[in-house]
Amino acid sequence: MADLPARRGHYIGERKVSLHMLGTAHGAVLEGMDATVVLVEADVTAGIPQFQIVGLPDSAVSESKLRIRSAIRNAGLQFPSQRITVNLSPASVRKRGPGLDLAIAVAILRASGQLPGDTERPGRGTKPVIVGFCAELGLSGQLVPIGALVNLALALRQHGRVEMCISTGQVSRCVALPNVQYYPFDSLASVVQALSVKSSWPAPVHLATDPFSPTGEGAQGNVDMSEVEGMAEVKRALTIAASGGLHALLVGPPGCGKTMLAERVSTILPQLDDESALEVYAIHQAAQLATPPSRTPPLRNPHHSVTAAGLIGGGYPPLPGEATLAHHGVLLLDEMAEFDRTALNTLREPLVNRHVRLARSGKTMTLPADFLLLGTMNPCPCGARGFGECRCAEREVERYWSRLSGPLLDRIDLVIVVSPTTPSFARKVEETSASMRMRVSAARALLSTASGNRSQTGHSFHPEPLSISDRPLQLLTESARQLRLSQRASASVRRIASAIAALDGRTHVLAADVQEALGLRAVPVSSSSHSW
């Protein structure tokens, strides 16, 4: 049996002069995307009844004093009428949210002698097992679900085997993790009973070995490329982008199908592996999104009024932005020219570094942002230039395209022209997303083998270009000189050519691949003579 709580005091003869005890419990709090394990220490001593919480608690944690007092009394237990001091360690980390309610209550009950004083559940042998208490308390003593449970579990797991006491209402949000078990409880009274009596622990939550479904809500699992009629050239270009992990901009008149095509690109990307799927799920949990676990790469489609902070993250406390929420997936900027220019320029660093570094209140936070960027836009404000009678003045077209800065356009690999097609009401068999995904996976496997890079999960795929012979290399060099391509743009053309070769099942680049890549890399200009 575990030792009783530490008791400290002194005696004069047989009369006790002073007595106070210390109780502890483990919890966790979320700071941005990362969770921090918190050791809750409760000290109950004689004196005027007070209840203080120290260790940088926010208002939600400070208000927990009223919830905890009512929950303990309504659970049929005695709330100590003494001086109670609760310390949340480490004291240098701000504690936010109601997720520490249960841990604080358990620590107080241990300090008052109503619970055994160990921080591990009884009856587990010699190997220590950390028990994490992660739940909010209602006034009646009922346990209330909290957010970002998987993030808290990952933080606790860093300290060894973990058994988490959670609310029964949170069972559906649990994800199977090695060395982590979840124990559901209805109320504080049931938690106290389990900690007091060895045989009263409930059965752990039985979780599926593979909690990640192939598709899921928010993962665009209900759309398919076969729903798009025709447009074989555009579909090929998007397949090239998916095969090489390349950013693309779709340009065409209104109603030609740009958005419909872009919304389906995530369905042709390879399915995420366990590690990537868990990372995506943890990110969405930290952002308080109700996205179910899924292996389908995420698709984020923010409105063009999004701010810079909403795009790359920020605020206080810092929250992930759309770039991080699209990690391992697709970030779609529909009507890209309508976005704020400053907000768009914040993507320049993530497109290269594949992460976002934020500095807030003297702290630096690094958020993952490895996504495939897809943009859609019209050729001009009226949308008809190159496809009909344009009513825009030349200066208006230049101003329209100037919303996309040169450095940002230089980071976009493919510019795909989407021409309007005549609708056909005859039923045709179009290639499905599953079929395209198989070809993309085969191309990525070939690129990975050729470059010695075995990682090809989701969009975390950045292989070296394939080998290129003298004639294609000479064509690329001469074209780069004539077109005045930057070094980044020249490297982009070679990556596009490598993706084209891999998609066609070849391990070497041909001159025809370079020519096709140059056609896909050309950035439109605003001159009236441009025919698209």
Image (spheres, rainbow, N blue to C red):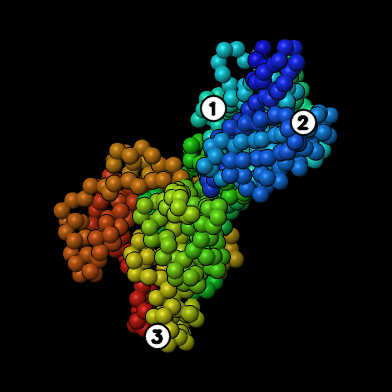
93 or 398, nearer to the observer: 93
Position of the N terminus by quadrant: top right
Which badge, 1 or 2, is on the more N-terminal residue? Answer: 2
Residue 322 visible in this rendered orientation of the protein: no
The percent coordinates of residue 364 (x first, y second) are: 44, 50
Residue 177 occupies quadrant: top right
Q: Position of residue 382 (x, y in %)?
A: 50, 81
* Residue 32 percent coordinates (x, y): 53, 48
Residue displayed at 75% across by 15% down: 15
- Compute the Cα span from label 1 to label 2: 38 Å
- Dot 2 corresponds to which residue? 80
- Disc count in the image? 3
Residue at the image point whose x is 35% and y is 61% from the top: 411
- The disc labelled 3 sits on which kind of residue? Arg
User: Which circle marks residue 408 in the picture?
Assistant: none
State the SS at label 2: loop
Identify the secondary structure beneath mark 1. Answer: loop
Label 3, on which residue? 395
